[in-house]
Image: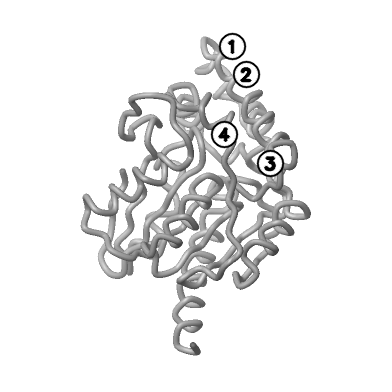
Amino acid sequence: MIHQGTGETIVLLHGATSSCNTWKHVVPLLSPSNEVFAFTALGHRGGNKATSSIEISDIIDDFERLLDKYNIDKPHITGNSMGGWAAIELAKRGRAASVCAISPAGFWNTPQHGQHLALKKLKRLAFIAKITQPLLPLLAKSSLIRMLALKDVAKYGNKLSGCEFTAMVEDMLYCEVKSSLFNTKQSLNFTEPLPCPCTLVWPECDLLFPPNINAVIAKERLPDARSLILKDIGHVPMIDDPLLIATTILKSIEYGKAFELNE
């Protein structure tokens, strides 16, 4: 977990096979005027241990237990990918003051629509990480290899340092529950208004959840949510442009406050 700052509470949730460290460059940009918590998900490296095969719903239950553990009632929740799905589900439970969901997972019609493409790419990344693990210290030194290895999740993967790249790959390697998550049968089905303002953020260059597919489904299921397209960033945009993401999060919070004032 990362915990910094004082003020209004912002909770950050990462994607599948990652960890709280995916937010390490965003947290300092938010914490000067906010209390920021970045949690690591159940079964992920540094998170609570999973005792058996799990589903997305178990991840969300564990996030809610973490909110209770740290006496966090209704924070502003931002999530990326699986974390975006979790943020929306936590909002449905009345645990969010506002939601900023960045390329949220779960918006697929069937396991073959959208989900299949994304999970196939993630499985391939996990396989490549496993077979190249002995060479990881050497491979991490090359900015070109970093960019090519992360092309499905970031447009500018070379922005990560060698150490950051290594840590990201090791997060995937040591995620206990990746097999369960890669084979999930769950989806995000919700057509009623959320009980709090919601901003859906779609990276223009997302190769896992292309906006022309997933944003359309999301609009059908969350018609009252505000939707944004951000240019020149990929699926995990905290790699590509931490400042843009921090600014987007803060603007989503301000939007939520203005929305509630106008209600």
Residue at horizontal 24 percent and vertical 53 percent from the top: 68
Task: Using the rendered view, name the quadrant where residue 29 is placed.
Answer: bottom left
First-in-chain label (4 vs 1): 1
Snapshot colouring: one colour
Q: Dot 4 lies on which element?
A: loop
Could you give the CA–CA distance between mark 2 and mark 3, rounded to whole angstroms? 17 Å
Position of residue 227 relative to residue 205, above or below, is: below
First-in-chain label (4 vs 2): 2
Camera-near label (1 vs 3) is 3
Could you give the CA–CA distance between mark 3 and mark 4, rounded to whole angstroms? 16 Å
Query: Circle 4 is placed at which residue position?
Result: 184
- Three-letter amino acid code of the residue under disc 3: Leu
Pinpoint residue 113: horizontal percent, then vertical percent: 74, 41
Residue at horizontal 22 percent and vertical 53 percent from the top: 70
Q: Residues within 10 Å of mark 2 (few under 14, many from 20)?
A: few
Taking the image as shown, residue 36 lies to the left or right of residue 186, namely: left
First-in-chain label (3 vs 4): 4
Pinpoint residue 201: horizontal percent, then vertical percent: 61, 60
Query: Circle 2 is placed at which residue position?
Result: 128
Residue with the most extreme bottom position? 262
- Three-letter amino acid code of the residue under disc 2: Ile
- Three-letter amino acid code of the residue under disc 4: Thr
